[in-house]
Amino acid sequence: MKNDTSDMSHASLNKVALSATIHCLTGCGIGEVLGMVIGTALGLGTWPTIGLAVTLAFFFGYTLTMIPLLRAGTDLRAALKLAFAADTASITIMEVVDNAIMFFIPGAMDAGLLEFRFWGSLALALVLAGVAAYPVVRWLIARGRGHAVVHQYHAETSGGVHHH
């Protein structure tokens, strides 16, 4: 079975996968940082803070994928379906890795918002989460799945042409 990426060179596939990973990490990172900041500022415990961060990471990850789809005229239901297909695996990997690192770095979850331990740990966790997700994102794109489906919509809409 041939897919849209079968003719894609390794360099091109790597570039698309890196771009998709960074895009996903951006949404994930926004939610993760907001969740950690809100949880820490409110004095929530470790688990409620992680729960909030994970919830917001999925929300912002899906939202950043859906915005260009909705602007291009895709209906909400179709945009949600595409975002779930494109982002669920990568956000899940990023969240597992990111939160495990934050949990296991001594004092990271108890550090205050003005402490380097908090921000340094969070930055390290997000970078490592992106590194962990990249091979899966690449593998999915190579098979015409995940971000390959959304990338197709972006490519179509960037030229002003849109197909449902």
Image: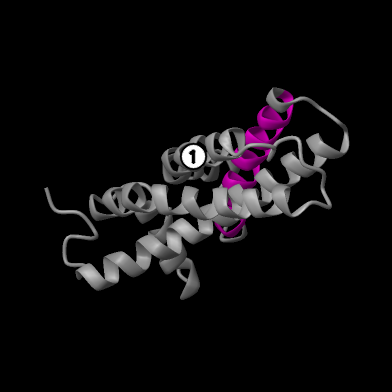
**Which residue is outermost to the bottom?**
159
Disc 1 element: helix
Residue numbers of the magenta segment: 48-70
Location of residue 11 with respect to 106 vertically, above or below? below
The image quadrant of residue 54 is top right
Can residue 162 be seen here? no
Q: Residues within 10 Å of mark 1 (few under 14, many from 20)?
A: many
Residue 16 coordinates in the image, percent (x, y): 36, 65
Q: Main secondary structure of the magenta part?
A: helix
40 sits to left or right of 55: right
* Kind of residue at disc 1: Val
Q: Nearer the viewer, residue 64 or 128?
A: 128
> Which residue is under mark 1?
97
Location of residue 21 with respect to 110 vertically, above or below? below
Residue 88 coordinates in the image, percent (x, y): 46, 38
Q: Nearer the viewer, residue 49 or 67?
A: 49
The image quadrant of residue 142 is bottom left
Magenta residue check for 36: no
Can residue 106 be seen here? yes
Magenta residue check for 69: yes
Location of residue 14 with respect to 125 vertically, above or below? below
At 71% across and 27% down in the image, what residue appears? 46
Counting labels gives 1
**Which residue is outermost to the right?**
42
39 sits to left or right of 155: right
Residue 141 coordinates in the image, percent (x, y): 30, 54
